[in-house]
Amino acid sequence: MTTLHVNGRAYQVAVEDDTPLLWVLRDTLGLTGTKYGCGIAQCGACTVMIDGTATRSCQVPVDSVGTADIRTIDAIEEDPVGRKVVEAWVAAQVPQCGYCQSGQVMAATALLKQTPHPSDGDIADAMTNLCRCGTYNRIAAAIRQAAG
Amino acid sequence: MDRLLTVDPIKLKDPLELQIEAQSAVLLMKPEGVSNLSRRAFLGFGASALVLGALLPSMPVRAQTAAAAVKPGTRIPAFLVIGKDNAVTLLSPFVEGGQGINTGLAQIVGEELDVNPSRFTVECAPPGPDYAVINGLRMTGGSFSTRSSYPLMRRLGATARDMMIRAAATKLKAKPETLKTEDGFVIHGASGKRLSYGELAPVALALPPRDDVALRDPASFRYIRQPVARLDVRAKSTGKAVYAIDQKLEGMLYAAVQHAPNQGTTVQSIANEAAVAAMPGVHSVHKLPGAVAVAADSWWRARKAVEALSVSWSAPAPSGLDTVAADYASDGLLAALKSSKEAGLPAETEGDATTAFATAAKVIEAEYDAPYLVHGQLEPPSSMARFNPDGTLELWAPNQMPELFQSVAAQTAGLAPDKVILHSPMLGGFFGRHFLYGSANPFLQAIQLAKATGRPVKVLWSREEEFRMDALRPLSFSRFRAAIGKDGRPTAIQARTVGEGPLGRWFGAVFKDPVDSSAVEGITEKPYAIPNRRMEYVKFPHPVTIAFWRSVGHSMNDFFYEGFLDEIADAGGQDPFVLRMDLLKDKPRHRKLLETVAAMSGGWKRGPYEVDGTRRARGVSMASPFGSETATIAEVSVQGGETQVHTVWVAFDPGSIVNPAIVKSQVESAVALGLSATLFEELVYKDGVRQSHNFDEYPILSRRSMPAVHVEIVESGAPMGGVGEPGLPGVPPAVVNAVAALTGQRIRSLPLAKNKIGV
Ligand code: FES
Ligand code: FES
């Protein structure tokens, strides 16, 4: 049994130690807002915040998480910064297919928590998630808007 | 078939310009690619495929009685559900996958129905004859959705509104003329009484529809042509949007698969089946056509187990339909395309090219090619199947043609089509990925596994399995020649295209033209006044599964043609922009676009010139894809052998539009995908297997390489063209032409990443 702290709640899960956090979130806890895209830390669709840091959950073995505070897109609107990011995403009409956007919103939220007024360079460094629909420019615009 | 179903007289200028019986849609996607085959590995499902092939022709006859009575797009209750709470649900013929069709349809129907589109819920309709609205066919593709259904959806909304008014008139004992509507209510002016559509719906939607209802005057449009917010952005920004991969059923097993390394081979034996069956959570191990599968209580456990299987596969057969030989290589295929001696079929002939070449001041010749590409939609494919106690099969499968998937699912399960309940989930990107491509679709595996286990099953392909099985944009090749006169203007152009297009492969049963338009589009029907033209096509089947890929033949052919046109300009000592304007003297629509894109970019300048200490240059191109027109300019620099695209300007004329904001974001998106293909993408076959297994070995465009994109919409008033794909084809040639202007290097083989670019 591993105890996980996800979105402010504690969950006991019985899975192999090396199970990626992504699959525990999606299949064991039913939190399917976090997406699977590549499984090898290339795309960022699986991005969650672990103790406030954007992390690609497909590469995080569940036994490495310990008591860390995991936040997923499913509870993004409970976070004041997350709420601002979501509003900016809606205002800029960012998503197309939307599949990458859970991860993009999590990465943007983590960025703005650490760097409330990011430079273009900060955005480039933090926002490395792939978007096959090419929404990169709107994402950057939305982050600038959320930063105010 | 004795009866053709006709819908609105919209003029479609594409290969699909024909009437198809709605009920014969099942006939459409049948591989026609390789003729001399002994193996019939259609769908990778051997015997069942033969059954399928034998049954297909008879199916439309069976379906006809029910289907023939329905005129697609006319039965209001098939499209509109209005609840007591006045919530409006629109059942759409199309599937949403990022292109914004749900919002667009809500605008069109809402405009005439008089309901604010923001109050719509739009869902993909189940299979049924009502939804065959593209000239009797139902699909989401070819950038057809809006343009094919625009008149129909307007009429649908207007007809439903009229039914609301008539129902209200009866209820209020008032004359219909004394009633008006306002955002979901019928209002009686004299008494001020208001009846909601929701309360009227049960009576109203049962009324016989009138077929002569007047449409709203476009001058009074409130929603159409407005940048209405997309209906799905909030759900997609908060993780609440549900895709195929997110769905779950009570008692469901998760399945993972491992496909044969060489396509077309089969499982011989599994060395460690018992050991794997004993792994944690494993329910069962399965042999499938061309694959092994494990069903387990979680997908991760299923995946670990299936990848632990030690499988011996049969030896690869010689290349054929869906069989890839052990020595198959993409560079070998390209060499074969180049050395083909087969006589070409005329794809476009005009004037007398032979004489023009004989009398030319100068003749130039060049060979262009483009590689295999994967779709790379970010959602890996999955499907979920359940056999219900009532004998039905329920299926959740990403798809762009519901009726076709339903009928193939029925064949696989041994059921009548109406016993298959198909759900078409929202797509996490598609770009042509979710047509029926035989073994490239996972839903057949889901059906087989649900049958074998007696449980609901969700099959999900890992990204690696998707790279192994995705149907590919075909590798393509064309050889060009041009005759140039003393004045430096082209007098003749000739092209020889050797290869295969997806239309011939998958729709060959219907589109019998031996010249596959999806292989030559973008080389034919160019707008330029080059008086003598001889474009020819040689069909050369590929052994691999080929696909429609955003903008299809245009995705490589406009690169070929527009790149070569710049070579013509250079050979004749002309500026490429000036030459294009000149060759478009009698084409005001195209000249306007060229002028627009030049103005957007601050006036045409080819360069090189300096910006912030780096040298830059620009390239221009035009394309006429899917009934729309584009003019594109790209600005590039080269640093350390790498091409950086700084800005792309697109002037886009789709005739007329529904939502300018969605149109612009679709063009931005198409630019990004086109640029990704230009700079990075290439799927290589070597020794019979694909060389890329995930995005680390197949880089796609990231933020780092994303240019600024400026889009201007020009509404010429021409018949409505497509929107989702047309922004793409102009990008590769504009970039390559800019690179040539900057470096003098003419790139004739994509992607740029494999060429060494130097300044
Ligand atoms: S799924 Fe984790 S980075 Fe792609
Ligand atoms: S919105 Fe489709 S992948 Fe980003």
Image: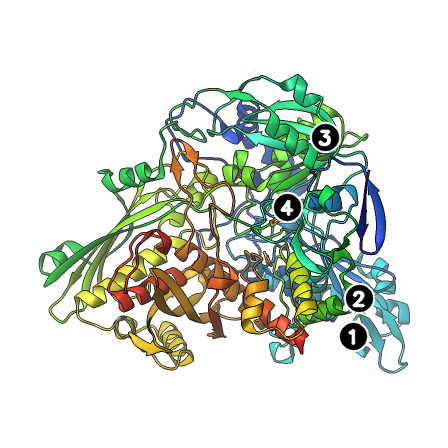
Q: Which residue is mark 2?
A: B164
Residues at marks 3 and 1 touching, judged by CB atoms closer than 8 Å: no
The C terminus of chain B: image quadrant: bottom left
- The nearer-to-camera label among 3 and 1 is 3
Type of amino acid at the residue the image marks with label 3:
Ala
Residue B436 at x, y = what percent? 55, 40
For numbered disc 3, what is the local secondary structure? strand
Circle number at residue B181: 1
Type of amino acid at the residue the image marks with label 4:
Gln
Label 4 lies in ligand 1 vicinity (Cβ under 8 Å) = yes
For the residues marked 2 and 1, what is the alpha-carbon distance in whole angstroms? 9 Å
Circle number at residue B584: none
Residue B654 at x, y = what percent? 48, 68
Left or right of residue B184: residue B702: left
Left or right of residue B522: residue B375: right
- The nearer-to-camera label among 4 and 1 is 4
Residues at marks 2 and 1 touching, judged by CB atoms closer than 8 Å: yes
Type of amino acid at the residue the image marks with label 2:
Met
Which of pointers 3 and 2 lies earlier in the amino acid sequence?
A: 2
- The nearer-to-camera label among 3 and 2 is 3
Residues at marks 4 and 1 touching, judged by CB atoms closer than 8 Å: no
The answer for which chain carries disc 3 is B
For numbered disc 2, what is the local secondary structure? helix
